[in-house]
Image (tube, rainbow, N blue to C red):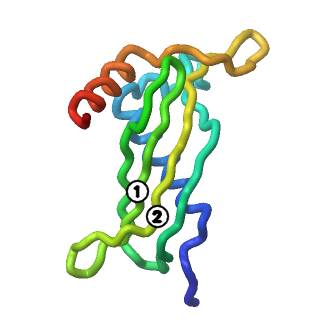
Amino acid sequence: LVGNIYFAHYYAWQGQSRDIYMHRLIPEYFRGTGENGELLCLNSSVRHLREAMPFDRISVTMALKSLHTFSAVFYYEYFRIEPDGQPTKLAFGENHSVWVIRDRQKTPVPAPFPKKVREAFWQSIRSNP
C-alpha cells in the first residue's frame, strides 16, 4: 500500500507531546481521574506544507507560544528526518489548552496552573525570549 500519513496523526502527536511534557513535570496529576486538575484542549490547528509517507521518520517539536493565568498556547513543528539526518518541515500548528478542575457536578472550571507547571513555563519563557 502507498499513501500519505493520515492528517489526524498530526493532532494526536500534539496531544502526545503535550501530555509527555506535562507528565514529566507533574506525574502525580496523571494518577486517578483528574481530581487534582487536568489540561483540556480548547482548539487545535495544523497547517500542512508537505506530505509525509508511511515509514518516514517524523520529529515533532513543541514550544510555549503564550501563557495566561489559566491557559497556554503551544506551537508545534513537524519534520521529516531525511536519510542524511537533515529535517524537512512538513507542517506547523498550535494547540490552545486550559487547566481546569472539576466542580461538584464534574463540570470543568478554569483554574491556575499547578506551581511546578507555572515555574517550568516561566523558565521556558526566560530561556527563549
Residue nearest the viewer, comparing 105 with 112 = 112
Q: In which quarter of the image is the N terminus?
A: bottom right
Q: Mark 2 points at which residue?
A: 91
- Quick check: 86 left or right of 41? left
SS at badge 1: strand
Q: Which residue is drawn at 36% across and 62% down?
A: 59
Q: Where is residue 121 in the image (x, y as percent from the top left)?
A: 35, 27
Of callouts 1 and 2, which one flags the residue occurring earlier in the amino acid sequence?
Answer: 1
Which residue is outermost to the top?
104
Query: Which residue is at 50% across, 76% downward?
Result: 51
Residue drawn at the location 45% of the way across and 41% of the way down: 74
* Horizontal relation, residue 76 to residue 103: left or right: left
Residue beneath label 1, please?
77
Are circles 1 and 2 on residues that touch, CB within 8 Å?
Answer: yes
Q: In which quarter of the image is the C terminus?
A: top left
Q: Which residue is drawn at 39% across and 37% down?
A: 64
At which x and y percent is residue 106?
74, 18
The percent coordinates of residue 80 (x first, y second) are: 36, 71
Q: Distance between the residues labelled 1 and 2?
A: 6 Å
- The residue closer to the viewer here, 25 or 59, is 59
Could you tell me the amino acid type at mark 2? Ala
Three-letter residue code for mark 1: Glu
